[in-house]
Amino acid sequence: MPDAYLTAAGAFMPGPPVANDGIASRIGAIDDRSETFGRLALRQNRITTRHYALEDDGTVLRSNAEMAALAVADAVGKSERTLADIDLLGAATTQGDLLVPGHASAVQAALGIGPVELASVQSVCAGSLIAAKAATLQVMADGKQAAAVAGSEFSSRWFRPAFYARAPLQDPQFRTSLEFLRWTLSDGAGAIVIEPRPNERRQSFRIEWIKLVSLAHMFDPCMAAGAPPERRTDRAGGWSHDPRNALADGALVLWQDMHLLKRIIRAWVGEYLKLIDQGAVDPAQVDWLLCHYSAESLREEIVSILKTTGGMIDAEKWFTNLHTKGNTGAAALFIMLDEFIARGVARPGDRVLCIVPESGRAMIGFMMLTAM
Amino acid sequence: MAETDTLAAADTIGSDAFVQQTMRGLAIVWTDFEARLDRVPIIDKLNRGALRLDDYKALLINLRQQVVDGGCWIARAASNIDVAHFGLRSLFMRHSTTEHRDFRMLEENYAAVGGELATIRDGEKNIGSEALSAWMFHRASQPNPFDLLGAMFIIEGLGALKAADWAEAIRQQLELSADQVSFLAYHGANDDDHLAEFQEWVAEAADHPNARRIVKTARVTARLYLLQLEELDHV
């Protein structure tokens, strides 16, 4: 069976970078307290610029699928392949442009390539690694020669004030969580190319393994949209049972349960520590850590546990572009990889650990790469 | 099971690596325990904002019957620690002193929410508490029972990471005052720095073979603690 190599990464960021003082005019204000909550969120996430596929006047620059397609084109352009060589297209996003059919179909159409096999993944941040694992296994076991995988998000659509009309905004904790997401998540797409052989003239990374684990059997939805928190597990609690009123009732609001998140963060750390116990990860042998996290403040929460358990990876090995590219969910890892590869800092033999936690319902994904 | 099998002795991997390995094992046991706590009916009710006053009273009665033994098993453990480990003996003795009055706070909370003192004092251990208490005394009766650091890790962890949140949630849901939830609130406020402290204690025990059982004892204690909460009022 051949190995699988990550041979290129690419990205597409819509519009110009938007600084902190430009956010309000893009996503609007729910009411006059929005900016106060926004300043708090920005202090926690420490993001300085991000991109939006919406302009101030509501003009849509790109659809979710178009952003994904442009990221794939960028990645393939940096590989030793052409778009015509792509024989598997994976696409992960939290919410496609249409409810039906799958997002990858729209990405394929936007790229204008085919016939081709698809892998559509609907999850949250870790969808990027679910799709990457599908592509890796197809390259190793099904003879695929050039797989492209996109992760993309068009989060700002959901942050416009109309979505919050009747949400319970008086509850300070709920409100804080809503605004945290509004002022933290933004738009963009990233992509990678996976092949059964390394590049001849450019750097490649051998994919050692990809491991994902979901703890949904132990936790309720933690970041969700489609039902308010109190109806998150009701059989008929979802928006689709009463679509006429769903928007007005605030059922389409993206929310996060901050109490539950704290418990899930510790569970993620537990999964990481298990990898160390199993010998899959040796923190001392990791040269680069590309860890997706939603906010600088959340990173700090886990450092003390990692230090006492021998799980810490030194701060100078951490690579992130969260602060300039924003938190782009399923796109974030690939956007990070694009910049990481472009910097050319990885030397042959370097071990690169990628970690993508997904708070949606307690999932976490890990990918280990070796630089060629 | 896995951790005990793979846990190397301190003299083969070095004391620092042993301490890290143990702390890692404890963190993994903790995260599994914490996730499973959310599936225990009374905690699930609390998380969903559906707790009733009777649930809280039942929790106080059930906890009290085991907490009343808390200082005693630690004291028994202390009496079984030899002089070569004087520092740990002191630690266990100190710990025993702080724990052995805790049940009174549970009784006061129970009375403060309208319960009869006689009811909580005459209560019986539920079947989970029986198992938990018997387990603690069994381990505490062994010579140099340093594996009980694992049991302390679980119980202190409940104080450091869960008690304050639970106290606040109970206070809000049942519209109680601070003095009615003081047992949980007190433990939340007092067990702050437990990770760093534990690291030192594990290091002190590292040269003894029983230190290799710390993670396993934590796992058993965690399971039995869940059992105690699952079996509320089943006496």
Image (tube, grey):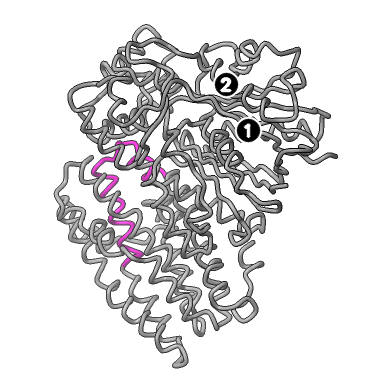
What residue is at 30 percent from the left and 25 percent from the top? A22
Q: Which mark is residue B167?
A: none
Q: Locate the C terminus of chain B by quadrant.
A: bottom left
Which residue was labeled with disc 1? A9
Q: Position of residue A164 (x, y in %)?
A: 29, 19
Amino acid type at circle 2 is: Ala
- Residue B1 at least partly seen: no
User: Mark 2 packing: few (<14 Cα in 10 Å), some, or many (20+)?
Assistant: many
Report the residue that reaches farthest toward the bottom. B83
Give whichever of B173, A30 is nearer the camera: A30
Sequence-first disc among 2 and 1: 1
Give whichever of B221, A168 is nearer the camera: A168
Classify residue B184 as left or right of residue A293: left
Which residue was labeled with disc 2? A68
Secondary structure of the residue carrying numbered label 1: strand
- Write down the chain letter for disc 2: A
Give the extent of the magenta segment. B40-67
Magenta run includes residue B57: yes
What residue is at 53 percent from the left and 39 percent from the top? A363
